[in-house]
Amino acid sequence: MNLIIVESPAKARTIKNFLGKDYEVIASKGHIRDLPKSRFGITVDEDNQLVPAYSVAKENAPTVKEIKALAKKADTIYIATDEDREGEAIGWHIAHAIKKDPQELPRIVFHEITKTAINHALESARKIDMNMVNAQQARRMLDRVVGYKLSPLLASKIQKGLSGGRVQSSTLKLVVDREREIKAFVPVEYWTIDTLFKTDIEATLTSHMGDKLSKLSIENKNDADAITKSVKADSFVISKIETKQRKTSTLPPFMTSTLQQTASSKLGFTPKKTMMVAQALYEGVKTPDGTSGVITYMRTDSLNMAAEAVGAVRGIIENRYGEKYLPKEPKTYGKKAKGAQEAHEAIRPTMLHFTPEVAQSFLKADEIKLYRLIYERFMACQMNDALFEQQSIIFTGKENEYRASGRKLIFDGFYAVTGTEDKDKLLPTLKEGETAEIQSIKPEQHFTEPPARYSEASLIKKLESEGVGRPSTYAPTIATLSSRTYVTIEKKQIIPTEMAFTVTDILEKNFANIVDISFTANMEEKLDEISEGQTDWQKLLSDFYFPFMEQIAEGKEKIISLKLAKPLGRTCPKCGEHELLLRSGRFGNFIACSGFPKCKYTEQVDEDGNKVEEKVETSDQVCDKCGKEMVIKNGRNGQFLACSGYPECKNTKSIDVESKVSEAPCPDCGGEVSLKNSRRGPFWGCANYPDCKFISKFEPTTIKCKEKGCKGVLAERTYRNKDVYECVKCKNRTPRGEEAK
């Protein structure tokens, strides 16, 4: 029996399907040996080298035991973890965990999980690449050093729950710097002279009185009015008509960053969701041929494509679209990302006969959306460019000159696969020397716009262009910033919180290298050099560690604490022993007992630090346990009654809302309609339930709905600040007063 060890159970199941009974496939479920979670886990030896203290976590012990048991029976043990630095290190750790020499276990790699790829990998096994392992160890230890030493410092100087990180903090500075630009932005006024020539030809004013005009040339209303007057008095002729052909080039196949960006803009997927769906497509989904991986490895920064796959897709293009869509030679795309691992492939489909049309019957909704993107992008990248005819018309007057531009698609090329959102802007047939008349002219005031906030897609693009992080880190970095409440994501915009500014400001002043994007990118390059055997990993660690620890020690002394603990001169009303303090927290200032954690009394405060008195709404009921008045409180499921004697008496009861009866009868059976309560809030329901199941959010009236075929009645409600009638059946809305029309 032979044993193959992979990372994920889904991948294990897929590979097991391809191989016979001579092979057993098991998953490590990711890292099974790592730095300890509860302590720093790195020591410095007598040679000033950093030594990691790896251990197997309790939750991973059963997996290690299972792998060990299978390894004892196996003739050959294959390490088949992902082909990147992380995967190489996982394989190395697995070998150590099961007490095997890593260099004695055959290492197999594959970019796709298909039967052909697995068999080829088994025939061409290699040894574990220690350069890649050491690069991963260096990255892991650098991140541990920064995280474990910087995060407690931030927590001690600002507030609990804060963290700093090697990639995280420099990424946060990008977001904060962009917000600073937006806040410092001063709008500049400019004007345009919006002009139409007959018939409906949009034209742009390019010069006035011999001076060329740019976007911001017309600065105020007086200038705009003067130019408008000049244009109206001018007479124009068509002085020049230019016609040129322009190509729109094919885009390269996807790599991790571009897949995340395109899935965000076209499908609305977050980077995290994109990677989860792509992982499923890679590890194995149902196909007509059984379970198989249908895309290549999704964590890659390479644009390489296997010659066999390119040859196959070229054949499909020629058969399906014809010879004119096929370039004479296969298209290749150069390295884009800094440090791209060229041994890897771009993201492409593994089975071209598994078209999106076929896949529709096998894949889940999100899977088919992403698979279609990948499939069509790969096919398009091997097709001819699209060809446009571009036309420019110059309208010349005595004092002014205009340009109008239009274009039409004359050969769709790769658009035959992907489709195009570009609409033809056709110009009418005109001749040089003809006179041209102004159809309309209107001066318009504008103001320059501040730079846009980053979206998840544009931030990933920025990180990639700067060489920060690697394909596997983009999505987790953004997720960390969000979970730490450093940023919020609203309408796809990444917005830094006040805490983000505070933390970035402190790091800029005391840890400039940690938030310097070029320093972080340079560190990534050095990690790449380690993986290529060009740099010693222990030297990189020591060169960073000792100066950084000096920065930490200096920070502990010099950074002034921003933690708020102002005595208020009041004794805690709960414990009666300790003084109350005004403190700062993740969600603003609050008042707390200085006896915490023994006494956990807190009070809400407003922006000025004054106690917020909770408004108490009384009821006409008394507590049936202690006799005190019951008050109305708001809970997660709406309002409820609670004893005013809380916390001594914790009696609560639901509010009886059924006493309110509608004047209108049930529109279905004529029974009584009353207000009822539920976990989702109050609703109007028929008293004849369950024989009659009429319910409505709004109280029905006796007014009948006018919609054809609808037998409902109207209910009064407010919709978008307007008083309307809404049908309880068809939900059709009518402005109040128009129901009788």
Image (cartoon, rainbow, N blue to C red):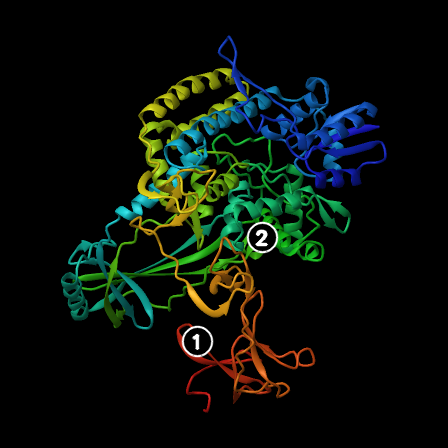
Q: Position of residue 515 (x, y in %)?
A: 38, 32
Q: Residues within 10 Å of mark 1 (few under 14, many from 20)?
A: few
Amino acid beneath label 2:
Lys
Looking at the image, is 219 positioned above or below residue 688? above
Q: Nearer the viewer, residue 214 or 697?
A: 697
- Residue 453 lies, with reference to residue 721, above or below; the image says above
Q: Mark 2 to mark 1: distance in Å?
A: 60 Å
Residue 75 appears in the picture as rendered: no
Q: Residue at the bottom extreme?
A: 741
Left or right? Give the position of 91 relative to 19. Answer: left
Residue 664 image position (x, y, % from top left): 54, 87
Q: Which SS class for mark 1? A: strand
Q: Is residue 4 visible?
A: yes
Q: Nearer the viewer's eye, disc 2 or disc 1? A: 1
Pick whichever, 597 or 4, lies toward us.
597
Which residue sits at x=44%, y=38%? 596
Q: Quadrant of the C terminus?
A: bottom left
State the residue lying farthest toward the top. 46
Q: Position of residue 10 (x, y in %)?
A: 71, 41
Q: Secondary structure at mark 2?
A: helix
- Mark with earlier residue (2, 1): 2
Disc 2 residue crowd, few under 14, some 14–19, many 20+, Cα 10 Å: few
Residue marked by disc 1: 718
Q: Residue furthest right?
A: 21
Left or right of 296: which side holds 438? Answer: left
Q: Residue 230 in the image: state x and y as whole percent.
A: 15, 66
Q: Which residue is mark 2?
A: 324
